[in-house]
Amino acid sequence: MASQIDEQQVQHVASLAKLKFTDAELSEFTPQLESIIDLFETLEKVDTTGVKPMTSATDQVNVMREDVAVNSNQREALLKNAPEAENGYIKVPAIIDESGDAE
């Protein structure tokens, strides 16, 4: 059973999502949304009895390396690359004006 979506319904959904469409875009998106809803209706008919839910498309658990903190003792090399350093720290411009005379 194919869904019948009209432009007024698409406009309503768009307004809920805070989107604005031109009339041309509305005419283009209405059949697209209808096709998407039809796909979901088709998927609803598939019998999934006994199918184990899956959370991933692969059986790999974690392909990344273990996240281990290491002390690489490269502070001096890092500070050499910094535009400005002071007392062993990278010096950055102030972003908060604490002078109290903000206008």
Image (cartoon, rainbow, N blue to C red):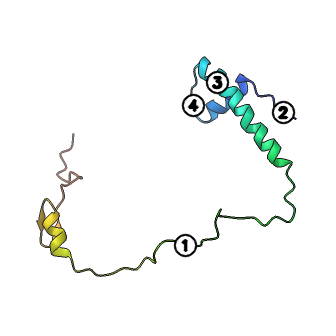
In space, the residues marked 2 and 3 are separated at their CA atoms by: 18 Å
Q: Quadrant of residue 15?
A: top right
Of callouts 4 and 3, the N-terminal one = 4
> Is label 4 in contact with label 3 (beta carbons under 8 Å)?
no
Label 3 residue SS: helix
Quadrant assignment for the C terminus: top left
Label 4 residue SS: loop
Residue 54: image location, x then y, percent: 71, 64
For residue 23, side relative to residue 96 (left or right): right
For residue 65, side relative to residue 15 (left or right): left
Residue where numbered disc 2 is placed:
2
Q: Which mark is residue 76?
A: none
Q: Which mark is residue 62?
A: 1
Residue 30: image location, x then y, percent: 69, 27
Quadrant assignment for the N terminus: top right
> Is label 1 in contact with label 3 (beta carbons under 8 Å)?
no
Foreground: 91 or 35?
35
> Residue sitting at 63 percent across and 34 percent down?
16
Q: Three-letter amino acid code at disc 1? A: Asn
Q: Three-letter amino acid code at disc 4? A: Leu
Foreground: 12 or 40?
40
In space, the residues marked 2 and 1 are separated at their CA atoms by: 41 Å
Residue 49: image location, x then y, percent: 87, 62
For residue 30, side relative to residue 85 (left or right): right
Q: Which mark is residue 28?
A: 3
Of callouts 2 and 3, the N-terminal one = 2
> Is label 2 in contact with label 4 (beta carbons under 8 Å)?
no
Nearer the camera: disc 4 or disc 3: 3
> Residue sitting at 58 percent across and 24 percent down?
21
Residue 62: image location, x then y, percent: 55, 72
Residue where numbered disc 4 is placed:
19
